[in-house]
Image (tube, grey):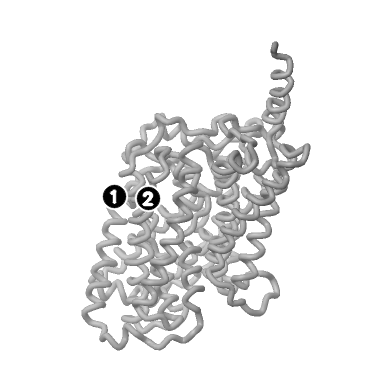
């Protein structure tokens, strides 16, 4: 995702700079303060990310599970609230350092942790890209009866990398300033019209019990979750509460308005489970005056623009892994990630309950790692009196092997979250474990704080906590320098 200065178009020099590195390697890893963007830029960006079909699909699934309109909106809103509580410190982690999620992981979690986080970033983002382009191919089929959903989704996954590869800002700007506002107005019109035409009895349909309310909140969290918030917010102002307005606007649009719109799609069309394509065609006829090609254009531009974020996540993670190699350039990583996305798009239809599976992993894996890094960045010194500055990004050679306390905390939290959401292989049932994503985040943070406090008491604490070699050398030299000083 190529960011534009002051919310406007990029100059050619800025495009060349972004395509070449985008501050995503240890050589050029921190966004300078004079490159930061305005709050208006982030409001426009997050409206685009929120005005997507993922949230319509979520509302559609809520209806399928027997949720009333009020219950669907409630689940979405509570999921959005939980996300904002998580995202504010996660965003500040990025804005206060100017670094990507993967580079921060290298400083805080060491080589093993950074590689693990980068692979999670690539896998989850590729899963969302696969879902998005399979959904777009399904919409084409619903509108025009094209069929061939899998081949079309694979082709779309390959073409979707274009914005990241070539720096095409036209489609991104068109989505941000034209299509996203049109989409918001369209869905608002759909909801208002549906509200006036649907009998009150229909808006309180019997609950089938297929998706418990707490689990529904968890799905909402997973659908809105990026997990790599530092990647985007490193371009923001380094103030703790600065990202709240854009995040709240995104939640209201995506997890309230669009969830309601998706519920209306299912109710008005009478579509059954997995009939999202025909339901979309019905809604285009119902509220877009039957303009099928206009519906296709709106869907295509938005899905491509939103998936800029998924590709951006994948590319930054890939750059962390291989961007330091001699002769390697960012566009090489873009091409590799296009192949990865295409493979995931081909595989996605074979995944049972694909949307819920991707949302489930999205809600726990990356956020758990981010929470551990937030605890390390903002609380480690208070807990252990050890200070880990991240201003200097270590090379792979200088980075520590691993922050074992952090990695254990992440793995335990992710395993708990996967068990609590029934995501483990061979797991036949989902236990009643409460609001699992939030519990996993808390487990990651509390467990890391406890382990770090214990590890800090042992002689080789900085090794076990993954301090980079230059930091260990500098801290080891300090006592000696103090002892040599004259009394």
* Disc 1: CA contacts within 10 A as few (<14), some (14-19) or many (>=20): some
* Image height of 331 relative to 282, above or below: above
Residue 335 x, y percent position in the rendering: 57, 46
Q: Residue at x 48, y 55 (%)?
A: 86
Depth check: 420 or 270 in front? 420
Q: Which residue is mark 2?
A: 244
Depth check: 167 or 255 in front? 255
Residue 220 x, y percent position in the rendering: 46, 67
Q: Residue at x 35, y 64 (%)?
A: 296
> Can residue 179 be spotted in the picture?
yes
* Disc 2: CA contacts within 10 A as few (<14), some (14-19) or many (>=20): some
Q: Find residue 440 and report its image quarter.
A: bottom right
- In space, the residues marked 2 and 1 are separated at their CA atoms by 21 Å
Q: Which residue is mark 1?
A: 177
* Image height of 366 relative to 258, above or below: above
Is disc 2 in contact with disc 1, using a CB cutoff of under 8 Å?
no
The quadrant of the rendering that contains the C terminus is top right
Dot 2 or dot 1, earlier in sequence: 1
């Amino acid at each position: 995702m190529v960011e534009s200065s002051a919310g406007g178009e990029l100059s050619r020099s800025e495009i060349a700079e972004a395509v070449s590195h985008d501050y995503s390697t240890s050589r050029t890893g921190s966004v300078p303060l004079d490159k930061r963007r305005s709050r208006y830029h982030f409001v426009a960006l997050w409206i685009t990310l929120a005005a997507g079909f993922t949230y319509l699909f979520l509302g559609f699934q809520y209806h399928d599970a027997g949720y009333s309109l009020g219950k669907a909106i409630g689940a979405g809103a509570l999921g959005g609230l939980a996300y904002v509580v998580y995202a504010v410190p996660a965003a500040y982690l990025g804005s206060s350092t100017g670094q990507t999620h993967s580079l921060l992981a290298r400083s805080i979690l060491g080589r093993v942790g950074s590689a693990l986080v980068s692979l999670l970033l690539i896998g989850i983002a590729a899963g969302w890209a696969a879902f998005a382009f399979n959904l777009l191919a399904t919409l084409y089929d619903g509108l025009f009866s094209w069929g061939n959903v899998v081949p079309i989704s694979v082709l779309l996954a390959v073409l979707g990398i274009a914005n990241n590869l070539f720096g095409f800002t036209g489609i991104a700007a068109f989505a941000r300033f034209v299509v996203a506002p049109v989409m918001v107005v369209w869905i608002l019109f759909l909801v208002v019209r549906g509200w006036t035409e649907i009998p009150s009895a229909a808006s309180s349909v019997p609950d089938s019990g297929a998706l418990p309310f707490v689990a529904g909140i968890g799905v909402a969290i997973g659908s809105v979750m990026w997990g790599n918030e530092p990647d985007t917010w490193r371009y923001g102002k380094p103030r703790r509460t600065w990202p709240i307005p854009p995040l709240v606007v995104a939640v209201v649009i995506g997890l309230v308005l669009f969830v309601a719109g998706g519920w209306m799609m299912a109710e008005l069309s009478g579509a059954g489970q997995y009939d999202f394509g025909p339901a979309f065609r019905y809604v285009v006829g119902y509220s877009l005056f039957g303009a099928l090609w206009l519906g296709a254009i709106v869907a295509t531009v938005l899905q491509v623009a939103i998936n800029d974020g998924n590709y951006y996540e994948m590319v930054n993670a890939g750059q962390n892994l291989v961007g330091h190699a001699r002769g390697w350039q960012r566009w090489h990583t873009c091409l590799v990630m296009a192949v990865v996305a295409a493979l995931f798009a081909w595989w996605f239809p074979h995944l049972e309950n694909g949307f819920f599976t991707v949302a489930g992993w999205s809600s726990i894996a990356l956020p758990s790692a981010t929470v551990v890094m937030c605890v390390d960045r903002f609380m480690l010194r208070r807990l252990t009196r050890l200070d880990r500055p991240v201003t200097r990004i270590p090379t792979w050679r200088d980075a520590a092997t691993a922050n074992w306390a952090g990695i254990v905390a992440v793995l335990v939290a992710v395993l708990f979250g996967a068990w609590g959401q029934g995501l483990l292989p061979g797991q036949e049932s989902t236990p009643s474990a409460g609001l699992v994503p939030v519990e996993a985040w808390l487990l990651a943070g509390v467990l890391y704080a406890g382990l770090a406090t214990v590890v800090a008491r042992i002689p080789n604490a900085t090794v076990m906590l993954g301090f980079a070699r230059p930091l260990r050398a500098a801290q080891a030299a300090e006592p000696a320098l103090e002892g040599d000083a004259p009394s």
